[in-house]
Image (cartoon, rainbow, N blue to C red):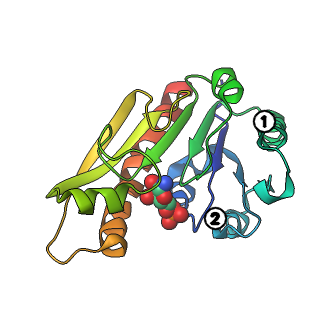
Amino acid sequence: MTARVLLLASGSGSVLQAVLDSKARSAIVAVGSDRSDAFALQRAQHAGIEVFTVDFSDYQERAAWSEALRAAIDHYQPTLIVLAGFMRILDPTTVRAYRGRIINTHPALLPSFPGAHAIRDALAAGVRVTGCTVHWVDEGVDTGPIIDQAAVRVQDGDDEPTLHERVKAVERDLLVSVVTRLIEKTE
Ligand code: GRF
């Protein structure tokens, strides 16, 4: 079966950009976001990739937003969904429907520092080594089986932005490596 990769991102999309710039580009069918203003969408459009938005602020109820996102995803019939800096929790029914086909990248060495403030939490904990993780998405938050990880040393004087940038540089390569491997498995 030909790989059909759909990426979701909420922010600047610099990690997503690495996938767009890799040989995985030919398998990407769409990039979606929960925010109309996500720069990730502009990156995808610039790369000639179809984009869609299911803007969280357009919906009164989370259930309605989840349903609309699920319909948008189903439309593309993806074989792999990549959460590349997607800051919403996918509805459990969507996770179950695509179990074993959704991966997430997280800027910490899970199970350490799950959640939305991984870099801040690593600095607060005073760890000397942190890193990033790509894992299968299950119904939990950052809890699915780990696929691969990479370590990043914390440097004296690091603050959240400097450490996050250093982690993202490693995270980009890790995500491209995992996505490429999974695509090769599909074909
Ligand atoms: C990445 O570190 C990702 O793991 C985290 O948010 C960051 C996204 O950065 N969830 P960007 O938007 O790709 O620059």
Estimate the x, y position of residue 133 in percent, counting from the top left. 36, 43
Q: Quadrant of residue 38?
A: bottom right
Say which quadrant the N terminus sits in. top right
Seen in the image, is 114 located left or right of residue 99?
left
What residue is rendered at 80% in x and 44% in y? 65
The CB of the residue at mark 2 lies under 8 Å from ligand 1: yes
Say which quadrant the C terminus sits in. top right
Rendered view: 139 above or below 107 = above
Rendered view: 159 above or below 11 = below
Q: Which residue is mark 2?
A: 40
**Numbered disc 2: secondary structure:** helix
**Numbered disc 1: secondary structure:** helix
Mark yes or no: residue 44 visible. Answer: yes
Seen in the image, is 20 located left or right of residue 121?
right
What residue is rendered at 67% in x and 64% in y? 47
Look at discs 1 and 2 and give the one toward the viewer: 1
What residue is rendered at 30% in x and 68% in y? 163
> How many other residues sit within 10 Å of disc 2, few (<14), some (14-19) or many (≥20)?
many
Estimate the x, y position of residue 107 in percent, counting from the top left. 38, 53
Q: Which mark is residue 70?
A: 1
Sequence-wise, the earlier of marks 1 and 2 is: 2
Q: Nearer the viewer, residue 9 or 26?
A: 9
Estimate the x, y position of residue 25 in percent, counting from the top left. 59, 51
Estimate the x, y position of residue 110 in percent, counting from the top left. 32, 40
Q: Amino acid at mark 1?
A: Arg
Q: Which mark is residue 7?
A: none
Q: Nearer the viewer, residue 2 or 41?
A: 41
